[in-house]
Image: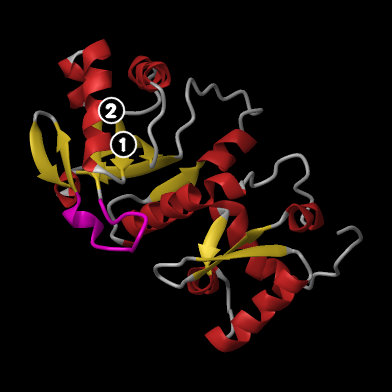
Amino acid sequence: MSGIVHLSSAHLNYLEPLLKWRVLDIESLRKECFRAPKYHNFYRIIRTLEKQKVLEGYRDPFSRKKYVYLSSFGESQLSLKENPTALSKDTLIHDIKVVEVTKAMLELGWIHEAELEHRIHDRRHIKTTFKVIPDASLFGEKKGVKFTMAFELELTRKNNQRIVEKAGQYLEGGQFNYVLYLFSKKSLMQKYMEVISERHGETIFERIMFFYDENLTAKSGDIGSWQGYFKGKTIHFKELFW
């Protein structure tokens, strides 16, 4: 589609959260907006923007939630040709889960700020050197000590060389205190732990934490109950932030 859609200030308000989060379910998007209308009216507006090809949508087959994100045309209407939100249909499920996990951690107060991968890419030109860019950078504080955590969501296995190299970049770099790996299968988590520790040694478990949720791609659950491994012991996710 070409041309211009005349977006009102209200429309721009409703689209702005997608610049930060890339993809949101409709109710989450509504909550992020300033003075958004009630759900029914808001849904009608979003449907109109879909019909105008400003937005694209996806309905999760498990939760039945409707998700929306900016189309390439929509990005062009917001002057994002040089710095697009970079969402790909090939990684849509991955990106949805990164957002949902990150937002859940914010809502629980476990972190106070987060920055997704596309936002880090956007500001790379500000002479900021990132040795490796995670799916999200998480910023928090525990017992008065501030921390920065890299978040990597792994739904499928990468080849061993890539796994080892990326972990090595995190360990060598100084921009993150910790690295959080989250997996959709326990077996996948165990393989990453084996591959990374074999190459970099057992000391990795002092900075890298590994967690999994077998229902991650099927439904939203209690993230605090996720099981994982950190600093030599098996723990639940919520224990990291106590």
SS at mark 1 in the image? strand
- Residue at screen point 64% across, 44% down: 86
| Region of the chain picked out in magenta, as a range | 214-226
SS at mark 2 in the image? helix
- Location of the N terminus by quadrant is bottom right
Mark 1: few/some/many CA within 10 Å (<14, 14-19, 20+): some
Mark 2: few/some/many CA within 10 Å (<14, 14-19, 20+): many
- Furthest residue in direction right, as rendered: 3
**Cβ atoms under marks 2 and 1 closer than 8 Å:** yes
For this view, does 237 lie left or right of residue 119?
Answer: left
* Above or below, comparing residue 80 to residue 61 in the picture: above
For this view, does 146 lie left or right of residue 154?
Answer: left
Magenta span: predominant SS is loop
* Above or below, comparing residue 205 to residue 62 in the picture: above
For this view, does 80 lie left or right of residue 104?
Answer: right
Question: Of 7 and 52, which appears nearest the observer?
Answer: 52
- What type is the residue that disc 1 sits on? Tyr
Q: Give residue 39's position: percent from left, percent from top.
A: 54, 84
Which quadrant of the structure image shows residue 10?
A: bottom right
Q: Does the segment drawn in magenta span residue 219? A: yes
Please tell me the numbered disc located at residue 7: none
In the picture of the structure, the residue carrying the numbered disc 1 is 181
- What type is the residue that disc 2 sits on? Tyr
- Residue at screen point 79% across, 70% down: 52
Distance between mark 2 and mark 1 Cα atoms: 9 Å
In the picture of the structure, the residue carrying the numbered disc 2 is 192
Question: Of 154 and 149, which appears nearest the observer?
Answer: 154
- Residue at screen point 79% across, 50% down: 79
Residue 38 appears in the figure: no
- Residue at screen point 49% across, 74% down: 27
Residue 14 appears in the figure: yes
